[in-house]
Image (cartoon, rainbow, N blue to C red):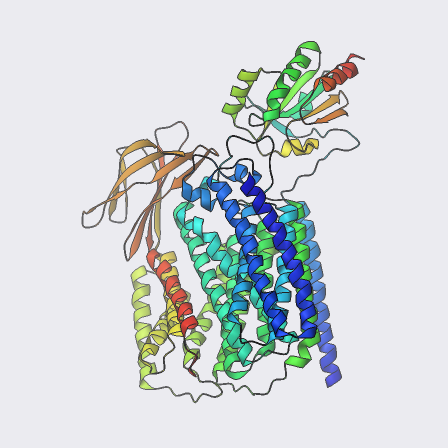
Amino acid sequence: MQFLEKTKKSIFSLIILILLIISFFVFKSALQKEKIYFPKMSENQIFTDFEVVELIEEKQINFNKVLFGKNFYLINIWSSWCEPCKDESDKLLELKNGTSIMMIGINYKDKKKNALNFLELYGDPFDQIFIDKQGTISINFGAYGVPETFLVNEDKKVLKKYIGPLNDEDVNEIKNITDN
Amino acid sequence: MIISQLGYYSLIFGLLTSIFIFFNSSIHLKKNNSVISDKLFGLIGFQFLFVFISFISLIYSFIISDFSNETVYNNSHTTKPLFYKITGTWGNHEGSLLLWLLVLTGVLLGFILKSRNEPNNYRLLTTLFQQIIVIGFFIFVLKTSNPFNEIFPVQTEGLGLNPILQDPALGIHPPILYLGYVGTSIIFSAALASMISNYVNKSWAKNIKFWILFSWIFLTGGILLGSIWAYYELGWGGFWFWDPVENVSLMPWLSLTALLHCIVTLEKRELLKKWTIVLCIITFALSMVGTFLVRSGILNSVHTFANDPSRGIYILTFLLFLVLLSFVIFIIFENKNFTQKSEIFILSKETAVLINNWFILYFLSVVLIGTIYPIFLDVILDEQISVGPPFYNKLILPFLIPFVLFMSIGPSMRWIKTNFKIGVKSFLAIVFTLILSFITVYYIGEKNIFVILLFVGFFYLLFKSLDQFREKTKNLAQIFSHTGFSLLLISILLNSFSSKEIVKNIRVGESFTLKNEKIIFKKISVEKEKNYESIIGFFDVLDEKNKIINLQPEIRIYNEPEMATSEASIKTTLFKDRFITINIIKDQNFFNVRYQHKPFMIWIWISTLIIMIGGIFAIFRKNKEVNI
């Protein structure tokens, strides 16, 4: 009798234990699954197969089509509320006027009105600007925050990645790479 | 700036104190010296003080809009009214976890102060276990959710508090809810402590009953405030949506309610020891599960919270650790504690409590499955589903009928053994119940036999509970809670069966009708407030007696962050609420108007308050040998 009781008890405990551990792993994988975005970059190649919305005309376009027909693209993640972005703006203008790189702006977690104001005040260095209201597009690129700049070639390969505002050295480096 | 620093260092000192208390209490356990222990308990006061200073610093940073603090920057704005600057402190992930810590250390302090006459070992062990939880949360706050992070360069303006959270009921909802929610931690710690120190007996039950009631009352209040907020702010006219975030507050409530009944049985009869301990553990585990589900961002919900996988994994691992810890302790100390001496007779209050527990546990599992099943399904089969009210209605409603019948009979049972007699009085009560139920059902025009049975059950419970007011040795705590509960069920049922609504797109000057009422859209006006602009619609409602009732629903457009919310206009009477909301339709002169009759709404709030009053009676009740 007592033996039976004991086996019953240990089987019961074992079941509870297994259930607990299964739940733990299910929750753990659920955590990584839902609503959490990871950079989808592979071998330095940028992930581009997603839709983006243009800032001014609010037209939707596949990002693949944006990166087309040029040798170099500079993707800059910026926002009107970001202080360092203001310092960075003349560097970007310099690049726009001095090179043939296609300048793409990603407007990060911003409001249209503020973004347009910002461009008017500090100049618009971009050929095209897309909005990233939720910040998910920037995560796709593997960005950590604002400002962040990616130099991408025609194969969508990331040649250089700059975290934080660009400085004169960075500008020269970009110029050197794209001139050759 | 400096205040924010003070808060941060105060937290670190708090953590150090915790670690110190943890090691010291384990050393004292061996020595069992009560003088040294008193010093140790003094340290608990300091620990609370450190967290308190930290909490006050955060509030202060919010009040002065110190935007060098990241939490303040993300969740506040200079144009916000003072009240919402303060409530913004806990209206976000970091701040609310600091509140967790505050309550966690606060209840331990309260416990130590209230348990002076308890065995030293039991107090030390409770401190030890509570410190494990406290340390876990200290590290969690400091590592993943530091409320005192600085941002550089200092910003001049904050991002603002989600406008949907700018509501008085929701402002005080988190502190009240947390007192209940986190209060269960001390029950958990004390349960483990009582097992190890071989103290699971009547005196322990008496000691811990206060904390069970304390958590239960605040949890009830917190849920009530949350429902009121949902009703007024979300603008749908509902008060309970079976939303996962609501469910995670209901689950600990259910298991606390079961525990509440068990602990009294343990106090009077030294029965159900094992079960009581299990419930203590389950209750806190459910609180932790809730915190995990809400704070990890694993759920899609109307409540918006930050999501960050590292936070989720931390809480999940910590939760597993605590559950395994209690599991191991339970298995090791099981045989030492739970030798059952007394016998249970079938017709006794003990049986009634057991039946009550089984029902509550069933309801609990339904809610638990409904809440986590979608997560499991998504992970295992990659399928997305959402579990809605029909699931809960189907699984819960039928079982409510036998549940309330047992609930009606249970309280008149005696401890040990009852001799049951069916007198003229109980026969009359049944007849009266039947008549009243049929009248009600006829009045709301519902012919479903199932609905009739629900009403019969609920009314019977109401009469039986009210009937006990006449008894000589009456237990006001139980009478109030049970009366409140039956009123709540009746109000919810009436509310869901006879709510009426009409949705129309109309222009200013037009009107529509609902039943015998005519609703006229008089005019629109735009007003500017401190942190929002509001569009107010003026409506006149002509009721059956041609009396005019004014309703003024609003659309508020907040500036920081930019967002529109719909403010319902509600006129409450004893029998029904008139509820109206408006919405803008793009590029037209039309407004989308939604007008509803919500019968007996006020009774849902009142009856929940009555349930709480019952709990308060139980706290102040002198310990006489009477029925529960």
Q: Is residue B424 left or right of residue B60?
A: left
- Residue B82 sits in quarter: top left
Front residue (pair B424, B27):
B27
Total labels: the figure holds 0
Q: Which residue appears at 51% of the width and 34% of the height?
A: B158
Q: Please name the residue shown 41% across and 72% down the image.
A: B620
As drawn, B467 above or below A49: below
- Does residue B606 appear in the picture of this structure? yes
- Within the image, what quadrant is residue B28 found in? bottom right
The percent position of residue B547, horizontal first and vertical second, equals 19, 47
Residue B298 locus on image (x, y percent): 61, 48
Q: Look at 29% across and 62% down and name the residue there.
A: B443
Q: Quadrant of the N terminus of chain A?
A: bottom right
Image position, residue A91 (x, y; %): 66, 16
Q: Is residue B298 visible?
A: no
Front residue of A172 and B573: A172
Residue B539 at what x, y percent from top left? Answer: 27, 39
